[in-house]
Image: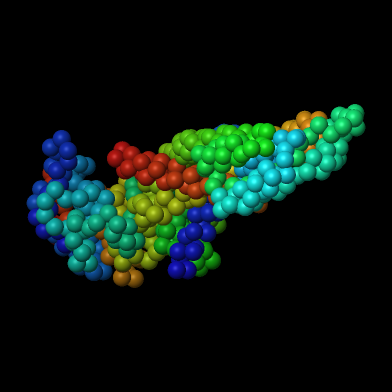
Amino acid sequence: MISLSQVTKRFPGGHEALSGVSLSVEQGELVFLTGHSGAGKSTLLKLIAAIERPTSGVVSVNGQNVGRLSRMAVPYLRRNIGLVFQDHKLLFDRNVIENVVLPLDIAGIDRRESLKRARAVIDKVGLLSREKANPVSLSGGEQQRVCIARALVSRPALLLADEPTGNLDAGYAADIMSMFRDFHQVGTTLLIATHDERAISALGGRTLHLNHGKIVEAAA
Amino acid sequence: MISWLRHQKHALTAALNRLLTQPVSTFLTALAMGVAISLPSGLYLGLVNLSQVAGELPAQPEISVFLDTRISDAHKQAIGARLKQSDIAAAHFVPKDEALAALSASQDLADIAAGLTQNPLPDAWVVRPHGTSRAELARVADELGKLPGVAETHLDSLWAERLQAMLAIGRAGVWLLAGLFAIALVAISGNAIRAQVLARRDEILVSRLIGATDRYIRRPFLYLGALQGLFGGLAAVGVLAVAGAYLRVPVAHLADLYGSSFHLIAPTGIEIASVLGLTAGFGWIGAWISVTRALQQVEATH
């Protein structure tokens, strides 16, 4: 589903975040990306979602060369990818359900149908009683769950999560991780950047270790 | 197609909501646009009214040919024959009795006419030549003036022509002003939209990340610009309505002094609709320029 071959990303100023990375992720796989901060985990996820473009090498998703995608085509790629951010990136000018429904609005889906789907996915992350609340009034863990609901509402085949439990205490983090296991079990491909070792050992799955922009594959 | 319509509806309601949640700034922007647009449209209306005054006057240039009071019948016939030639479109004989009767009928001059012991007016021809160019009119008037038995010729149209020329300058001025204020409108709209785009930076960035196209992001702002322009046009119509109500009484008074039944003409429905359409259109253009530039900046700083 995802394959990187000899991918290098150098930022203006000369810092090389990734050097010659090659990897592949199969459909339905659960893969953890680990490594110290600054090792290139976020950059790797951004390359897959075409938020950044590789300096050299090929990033392909479902056979599409993402690095070469035209500006016009990028939105359609992103509609098939669910993104979970460490800082949630929720909009505080609208309530929970309006946040979650946003990807469906963007895709032009009938409002009633999209509200129904949004409510179903909010229920799945356990926040149905808070659907009218403003995200500001939610705890960090709840905000992260709203972010996950938004990433899943359009039923993407691929979910990319960047430090989804980075700011959460252990209880919340375990909650979120067990949610990811459920999605994995229904066939979603997951690529999770984290340094939460406990979660990795609890969920199983393959681990890719990044060190200074290079892959050091570790056993599951 | 259905999803396209859904997007339009969504963007329109979003734009309306944004305008209505900021009533004061919406109102002020509309007022600024309205005052700007009311200047060229007011001038246009003034010209329409002036043209109406001018329209009551003979549009066709005419030459009055006054005959000598002691003219011989032979000369009279010769003049009649000359006026049947091909360069004359129409000629109408006004005997002096008829002229005096017309003078008496005219309300302001009746007193003068009543005081006359004998008719001082000459017989006259009112002549309309075929050609309407200045040179042709002058040639015909000159030729008729040289006929024996003609006391004087008078080109009636000259001042009307001058008025027409002035109105033409006025109309050119309207277009010039309209062009300038259209630019002002684009600038006002662009500025208002720019502030909106920057205020919604987070929403734009997040929408981008979850698959929004440029068109999706741009659309509500374009509606916003068009609606803002439309409100500006409505404000202009309001400004003109107030100005018209304010001017009605003094204008009626002036017209009364001239013995005219002239009254101010209100703009037609089509004229109002075109002003609203144009302001909405220029608001849209301003929004497009501004949102396109602002999106590039948002992208660059990301």
Q: In this view, does A139 lie above or below B25?
A: below
Q: Is residue A29 visible?
A: yes
Residue A196 at x, y percent in the picture: 27, 50
Residue A124 at x, y percent in the picture: 45, 63
Horizontal arrangement in the rendering, residue B96 relative to residue B277 (left or right): right
Q: Is residue B49 visible?
A: no
Residue at 15% over, 35% down: A13
Image quarter of residue B140? top right
Residue A11 at x, y percent in the picture: 17, 41
Horizontal arrangement in the rendering, residue B247 relative to residue B117 (left or right): left
Q: Is residue B297 above or below residue B17?
A: above
Residue at 64% over, 40% down: B63
| Residue sitting farthest toward the bottom | A186
Residue B107 at x, y percent in the picture: 86, 36
In front of the other: B105 or B255: B105
Horizontal arrangement in the rendering, residue B3 relative to residue B277 (left or right): left
Residue at 68% over, 43% down: B75
User: Image quadrant for the N terminus of chain B?
Assistant: bottom left
Horizontal arrangement in the rendering, residue B292 relative to residue B101 (left or right): left
Residue at 36% over, 41% down: B293
In front of the other: A211 or B241: B241
Image quarter of residue A67? bottom left
